[in-house]
Image (cartoon, grey):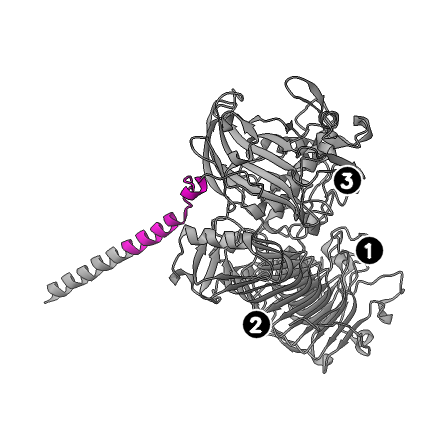
Amino acid sequence: MENIKRKNQQWVLAISFCILLLVLFISCQKTEDATIKIQSALPEDSLKEESASGNYPYRRLSTYGFFQGDLNALDPTEGVIFYKPASSLFTDNAFKSRFVFIPEGNNAEIEAEELNLPLGTILIKNFYYPTDFRNPDGDRKIIETRLMIHEEKGWQAYPYVWNESQTEAVLRVVGGEFEVRYIDLQGENQIINYLVPNKNQCKSCHNKNEAMAPIGVQIKHLNNEVDYGHIQANQLKYWSDRRKLLGWDEAKAYPTLVNYEDQSQELNDRAMAYLDINCAHCHSAAGPASTSGLFLTYDQQDPMKLGINKTPVAAGSGAGSFTYDIVPGKPEESILIHRMNSTQVGVAMPEIGRTTVDKKGVELIKAWIAELE
Amino acid sequence: MRKSIPCLIGIALASVLFSCGSSTSEQSFDSSQLTRVSQTEVDQVIEAFIMAEDSSTIEIPAGFYEMNSQLILDNKTGVKIKGAGMDQTVISFRNLKSGGEGIKIVGNAISIEDLTIEDAPGDGIKAQHSDGITFRRINVTWTNGDKSKNGTYAIYPVQCKNVVIDECIASHSKDAGIYVGQSENIVVKNSLAFGNVAGIEIENCDNAEVFGNTARDNAGGILVFNLPGLPKSDGKGTKIYDNDILDNNHENFATPLGEGPNGNTVTMIPPGSGVVLLAAKEVEVYGNRILRNKTAGISIASYQVTGFPAEAPNWSPYTTDIYVHENEYERNWYQFPDFSRELGKLILVYNAHGFAKTQDIIYDGIWDEKLSASIDSNPMRVCIQESEIENLRFTRFDLSKGEENITASKDATPFKNCEVKVNTDRSGLE
């Protein structure tokens, strides 16, 4: 009798143990389920034929006719002009090639130091990764092309995602996540989960008084020389010479920012250029981060607005264990560095556009804070 | 030497208090039973936000939505976002890989109703530059057991006009559950905030009414702040009435346990704070039930107590024009003021009623000496009309002689026989 009872108890124990295991297993399963699946397939019907009706946006990038020959060669057609801001926003080490299309017979104008682009202007920004960073002009994979179109109702942003065979990119307003592999400058294999923003996330950065606005296409970023292949020229003068820009005076009449990667420039100029292109689209009086009172435009003179001994407002975890945005001479105690150095959502700045740390940028801003008094 | 004895006792006490510092992970609803919707249905919601037309309704059916992208409604007018109920439509941002908040709204005459937002890495729902924004019956929370991983604000309208927050629940945020910043014309009513660092916070705002809410089990219940250096530089006109402000004794988890405050002002809030006014202007606090908050029922403080730089254009660090009357107070005999934050320590050690005694009302007694040589003329116009104030624990500190010579007085006479007219107007805010 006793024996049977004991046996029963053992059974109960064994069954309980199994149930426990099962529960554990299920709960583990649940966490596994929670990991995001990388989307790579594109909807079938997005590749249907379409004609260039003039009604934007088109479903397919090729319909716009920006490029000749193979689409992925990104070889611009007549009237599509290459451009390059002096400094570039960090987006997970992605390479970018940018073009502007200003409709035939139209032109940009300079008014009150602002570059105004006519209706119908399209900014074309391609994001790609060379297969091997040591050979940046070799094989590459284009991930997305973002268009900003100046429509009647203002600027609109449209993200296009490239297919595996690199023959086409299609409109994908909901954005997505894509795995990218490349070999970095040190020859090491890198894998990142590249995030394509959804259409409305574009405005998280491209936002001036709640209206969509270009970032790189401003006088201060384009008032510099680039190599067009056949000629080296100041970009805005080049536009002006081709009657795509009216009202251009001469380069020195306008502000200009340095390339922050150019080590021959003054540290302060490099740092301010970095902060302007990477932060000031939000952190300015007209940007969405005006709430913070931290304004990081290149010409900021007010120490408090620049973050010097300024307490945060709504930083939450972003503040780490620190008190001030910038502590002069102490980069390690500055919230600015803490947030640039993080990849944790809620801490990392900028809030979108990167999942890795811009190590060179961090070093630059550290060096700059170290020299502040 | 005399000072070191209370300090030693304090440290001993603190270790006891730390070990029994309260924390809660209570959830209003159980979202784990809901059906998880497909990726296609998730994408449909993202697309609905992007493609929304003016005057349309975005309906989000019942289900558990695991978002991997933000939901952003941009520059629309008259859009209503509607779930199937707080317990039915649950939008989780646990897997969000970028973006400062789960849902972001910019527009006019927008309402969002009947849904739950979970686990956003930054803020739960943020509305900015919006005129006419209503949050009704939305529940915003975090389900992490480890609350240090939670997001900043649950419900976060900022730089808005005509804000209504009604019948909402905000819990477990690392900063404020319901946070209204740099806005004007605000009603926060019939809502519940619990398990947050701050329950409800009105910051740099004009014309706000906060009534009929329950703020319980937060570190601080209801806060009115004005912080320096912001585009909306100072705010005034807040009424706080008919609220239940209970047991706000939760640990302050805005920074990890054991780590002191950082530059975020909320990290300095001592657990056990019912109402905190900091650099606040024109605030009336009346008819509330302020019960069992272990440090102080109402704290009236100037920004100088933070120790941060207290100068900014068009902003004053002083708390002025305060009218506190007809509130109900209750203290638990077995609870002591907080020892983890400076303001808590000040109250614990230096209050006028005896070491480690919970206070009903404290006033830091910092005044603008340009206006008056003495605080006895009540230059900051702080008026307290509580019946039987003699039976309440009131402390006015004197910090003017430096940290080594802090004194305190229980005499409320200079602040008793006056009234402050606070004007607010909530017409049109339903």
Residue A13 lies, with reference to residue A296, above or below; the image says: below
| Residue occupying the far bottom of the picture | B387
Magenta stretch? A21-48
Instruction: Please state the horizontal and vertical placement of residue B408, each as a whole percent of the image.
Output: 76, 67
Q: Label 2, on which residue?
A: B334
> Which residue is found at the position 61% from the left and 40% from the top?
A148
To the question of a shared chain for discs 1 and 2, the answer is: yes
Which one is in front, B198 or B21?
B198
Category of crowding for the residue at label 3, using alpha-carbon neighbours closer than 10 angstroms: few (below 14), some (14–19), many (at least 20): some
Instruction: Please state the horizontal and vertical placement of residue B364, each as a whole percent of the image.
Output: 75, 64
Q: Amino acid at mark 1?
A: Asn
Instruction: Give the alpha-carbon distance from disc 1 to disc 2, as whole Å.
Output: 44 Å
SS state under label 1: loop
Magenta: main secondary structure equals helix
Q: Is residue A26 magenta?
A: yes
Q: Label 3, on which residue?
A: A300
Q: Amino acid at mark 2?
A: Tyr
Label 3 lies in what chain? A
Q: Pick the quarter of the image with the N terminus of chain B.
A: bottom right
Q: Label 1, on which residue?
A: B314
